[in-house]
Amino acid sequence: MKERNSTIDLLRVIGIVLVIASHSYFPEAIEELICFDVVLLVFVAGYSFMSSSFIFSKENYWEYVFKRFKKLILPVWLVVIVWYILFGLILKDPISMTTLGKSFFLLAGGMSFIWVYRVFFTSSLLMPFFKKVVIEKGKWIILGCLILIQIGNDLLFRFVFSNMGTIGKVLEYLITYTIGYLFISMVGMLSVGFNRKEKIFTALLFGLLTAIGKIIIQGETLLLYKHPPFLIYSSYGLAISLLLYLLLNHVKLEGNMEKGIVWFSKNARSIYLWHALIYYLLVHFNVSLPSILMWLLLLCGGILLTYFEQILLRTWREKHV
């Protein structure tokens, strides 16, 4: 069995913890500081895929797609169904069929927070095609091309798609988001082949792009450039992601700490989805909490419900297998 990369596990845990924090109504200054959260998770996804043993072929690609669908989309659909039954039917919150449909397609206007799984899924569909390219071509040429493509993606959205109404919105989801997050995941893939000095250089490069971007946007918050992900937002997230990798790569996990981090990393998806349902319960019952308490409640609640979920699944398997 392949040894786990403990640094990637730590980064995934940090990413999920910060994403949940971003849903806890912290002040805008803190929100902007931690807005690298989703970028970190997509970077980790790319790094993990590049480190995997997957080799593209026509035969195994569709099997791979089915596994990605089963792993990323089906659990979200199950949560959407639970969300609709609990809030729409039992608690009588107004949830229209349009909202329900958008939720199943993981679009804006549907259930909150689940859009990120659309990003993970669409990016994962394209990563197998680029793994061979990353292995065979010059990594700096690829990185330069990626940055230029992302600049073009920004301009296409700003001056074309954003002025096209409904059609532009569809193109935004299909093209702008896909290219934006594929850019991040491919930097993650490239980073597997970077040595320490190259990772430092790349982090500084993206830090420079962030600084240039901040001058261009003249004091606006990075949060305005998160949906869809512009180069300035992605650069900030990638700079932080690479620096965190460099820092945490020297951390040695042992004993219960290692077990806890690995368990959290393996179950990050369930923790995230459970926190979304807890969030809706708080909103439904008009529960108002200080940001730090809300964050702890969402995080700890997601962890506890995931733990109980595993107990129930384990019990069911023992009785039916």
Image: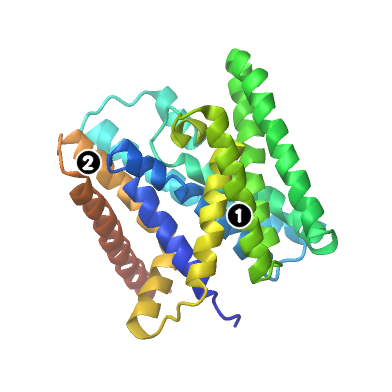
Most extreme residue toward the bottom is 255
Give the alpha-carbon distance from disc 1 to disc 2, as whole Å.
42 Å
Identify the residue under disc 1.
Answer: 204
> Up-down: is 44 above or below 78?
below
Question: Where is the C terminus found, in terms of image quarters?
Answer: bottom left
Q: Earlier in the sequence, mark 1 or mark 2?
A: 1
Dot 1 alpha-carbon crowd within 10 angstroms: few under 14, some 14 to 19, many 20 or more: some
| Quarter-of-image position of residue 288 | top left
Q: Residue at x 76, y 47 (%)?
A: 144
| Quarter-of-image position of residue 138 | bottom right
Q: Position of residue 41 (x, y in %)?
A: 51, 54
Q: Position of residue 171 (x, y in %)?
A: 65, 26
| Quarter-of-image position of residue 135 | bottom right
> Up-down: is 248 above or below 190?
below
Q: Amino acid at mark 2?
A: Leu
126 or 59, which is in the foreground? 126
> Up-down: is 145 above or below 249?
above
Q: How is the image coloured?
A: rainbow
